[in-house]
Image (cartoon, helix red, strand yellow):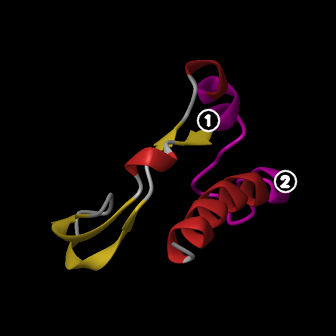
Amino acid sequence: MVVDYQSVRQIQIAGEGTDGTSFEGSGIVIPVLVVDSEIATLLSAYDSSNQYSPSAADSRAIARILLDALKKKSEE
């Protein structure tokens, strides 16, 4: 998993979340590329009905990728 930092942007947006609810606001868009070879592994370890899924290690790795990009953008 990697962030395309050249495409990180501050934007104003209106859209729809994965749960179908509409939203609008301003924020930072962080494009994340999940490499084809990682997809099956990530999804096989994820259970949306389990409150402890994904694992702490997977959650931390995903969070760090996003937070590193957010921190870098906010420091510009």
Residue type pointed to by label 2: Ala
Q: Secondary structure at mark 1?
A: helix
**Residue extending farthest top:** 37
Q: Position of residue 28 (x, y in %)?
A: 39, 69
The residue at 61%/72% (across/down) is 71
- Count neighbours of disc 2 (C-alpha within 10 A) and say few if under 14, some if 14 to 19, many if 20 or more: few
| Residue 47 drawn in magenta | yes
Dividing the image into 4 quarters, which one contains the N terminus?
top right
Front residue of 59/26: it is 26
Q: Position of residue 70 (x, y in %)?
A: 55, 68
- Count neighbours of disc 1 (C-alpha within 10 A) and say few if under 14, some if 14 to 19, many if 20 or more: few
Q: Which residue is mark 1?
A: 43
CA gap between label 2 and label 1 equals: 14 Å
In front of the other: label 2 or label 1? Answer: 2
Q: Quadrant of residue 13?
A: bottom left
The residue at 29%/63% (across/down) is 17
Residue type pointed to by label 1: Leu
In this view, 25 is above or below 35: below
Q: How many marks?
A: 2
In this view, 28 is above or below 38: below
The residue at 70%/28% (across/down) is 41
Magenta stretch in the rendered image:
39-58
Q: Which residue is mark 2?
A: 57
The residue at 60%/66% (across/down) is 72
Front residue of 16/48: it is 16
Who comes first in sequence, dot 2 or dot 1? 1
**Residue extending farthest front:** 76
Q: Quadrant of residue 19?
A: bottom left
Q: Position of residue 57 (x, y in %)?
A: 84, 53
In the image, taking residue 32 as reference, residue 53 lies left or right, namely right
In the image, taking residue 64 as reference, residue 36 lies left or right, namely left
Q: Quadrant of residue 67?
A: bottom right
